[in-house]
Amino acid sequence: MQIPKYKKYDVLRVVWIDAFTNDSPWSESDAAVKEQGQYIVQTVGFYLGQDKEYMRLSMSRGNKDDTCMFFNIPLGMIRECERLRVGKMVKTKVEK
């Protein structure tokens, strides 16, 4: 899949195929894979960039452009990728 160009901190929804394991202790490998199928995952996060192998997303972004909870998604496993529209952030007071 050709990955579109994104800007740093764009909010993306990425659909990708993750690795999985069979929870049965013993089975025939081919049968287990056919039974399980592909494990499709949707991840939403802030785009940090990519290299030849991985797209990097962050699950959280601080007010000083610091980030945490990184995800490295193998480019070869990505099936869909879209930029999500995020409205203007409005500060609200939380009652304690």
Image (cartoon, rainbow, N blue to C red):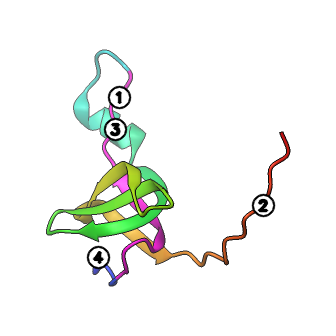
Q: Does the magenta stretch include residue 43?
A: no
Who's the residue at 33% across and 65% down the image? 78
| Residue numbers of the magenta segment | 6-23
* Residue type of the residue flagged with mark 1: Asn
- Mark 1, residues whose alpha carbon is within 10 Å: few (<14), some, or many (≥20)? few
Q: Residue furthest left?
A: 52
Quadrant in the picture for the C terminus: top right
**68, 2: nearer the viewer:** 68
Residue 39: horizontal and vertical position, in percent?
Answer: 41, 47
Image depth: mark 2 or mark 1 in front = 2
Foreground residue among 41 and 33: 41
Of the two numbered discs 2 and 1 on the same chain, state the one appearing first in sequence.
1
As measured in the structure, the alpha-carbon distance from the residue carrying label 3 to the one carrying label 4 is: 21 Å
Label 3 vs 4, first from the N-terminus: 4
Callout 1: SS = loop
58 or 84, nearer to the observer: 58
Quick one: 76 or 4, which is closer to the camera? 4
Residue 46 image offset from top left, x and y in percent: 44, 64
Query: In this figure, which residue is indicated by the disc labeled 2?
Result: 92
Could you say which quadrant of the image residue 52 lies in? bottom left
Q: Name the residue under label 4.
A: 1
Distance in Å between CA atoms under marks 2 and 3? 41 Å
Q: Tell me the amino acid under the disc marked 4.
A: Met
At label 3, counting other C-alpha atoms closer than 10 Å, the crowd grade (few under 14, some 14-19, many 20 or more) is few
Assign a secondary structure to mark 4. loop
Q: How dense is the environment of label 4, judged by Cα within 10 Å: few (below 14), some, or many (20 and up)?
A: few
Does the stretch in magenta take in 12? Answer: yes
- Residue at 38% over, 68% down: 47
In the rendering, which numbered label is found on residue 22? 1
